[in-house]
Image (tube, grey):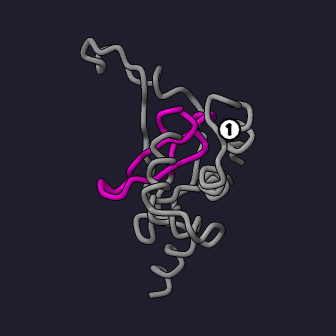
């Protein structure tokens, strides 16, 4: 479960919690949350009808800059926002419906890359995306 709201409260003056920012954080808070900016805006409008798309985009950019939210893309197009920024994890994506789950594989991907495969690089970050079919999509395929 994401602890985004609590982390933001602890920032105090570092990031002023306006009503608009609070709504964006509330929309993002939770487990396995990987929304696009448009999805964040659509959900934020349900809670605060006057919130603008620009305000949502600005708040997301600020959260990413603060390191409280991770911005990523699994399909090379739509950026998604993950509030689970403080807990190392990878993503598991359904190749059919696109659902995304946080996964925590064993081992350390930074050390799993052999020295001869590093080509002199100092590796500082690893992003792994696992792909497959979720149970619902796998069942639909087997039913046909």
Per the image, is 101 magenta?
no
The residue closer to the viewer here, 6 or 33, is 6
Where, quadrant-wise, is the C terminus in this rendering? bottom left
Please provide the residue range marked out in magenta: 64-91
Is 47 placed above or below 115 here?
A: below
> Which residue is painted at 37% across and 19% down in the image?
123
Is 4 placed above or below 19 here?
A: above
Please identify the residue farthest to the bottom as the structure is shown. Answer: 144
| Residue 62 visible in the picture | yes
Q: Position of residue 94 (x, y in %)?
A: 46, 63
Q: Residues within 10 Å of mark 1 (few under 14, many from 20)?
A: many
Tag 1 residue: 8
Q: Position of residue 56 (x, y in %)?
A: 49, 56
Magenta region's main secondary structure? loop
Please identify the residue farthest to the left as the structure is shown. Answer: 119
Q: Position of residue 118 (x, y in %)?
A: 30, 18
> Which residue is painted at 42% across and 57% down in the image?
54
The residue closer to the viewer here, 16 or 110, is 16
Is 38 placed above or below 108 here?
A: below
What count of labels does the image hold?
Answer: 1
The residue closer to the viewer here, 103 or 82, is 82
| Residue 31 visible in the picture | no
Per the image, is 81 magenta?
yes
Secondary structure under badge 1?
helix
> Which residue is painted at 30% across and 57% down in the image?
77
> Which residue is painted at 45% across and 43% down in the image?
61
Q: Position of residue 25 (x, y in %)?
A: 63, 51
């Amino acid at each position: 479960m994401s602890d985004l709201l609590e982390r933001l409260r602890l920032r105090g003056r570092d990031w002023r919690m306006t009503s608009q920012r609070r709504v964006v954080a509330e929309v993002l808070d939770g487990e396995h949350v990987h929304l696009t900016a448009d999805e964040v805006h659509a959900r934020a409008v349900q809670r605060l009808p006057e919130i603008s798309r620009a305000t949502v985009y600005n708040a997301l950019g600020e959260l990413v800059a603060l390191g409280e939210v991770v911005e990523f893309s699994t399909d090379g197009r739509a950026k998604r926002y993950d509030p689970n920024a403080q807990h190392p994890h990878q993503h598991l994506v359904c190749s059919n419906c696109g659902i995304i789950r946080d996964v925590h594989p064993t081992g350390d991907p930074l050390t799993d890359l052999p020295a001869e495969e590093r080509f002199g690089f100092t590796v500082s970050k690893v992003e792994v995306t696992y792909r497959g079919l979720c149970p619902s999509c796998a069942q639909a395929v087997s039913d046909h």
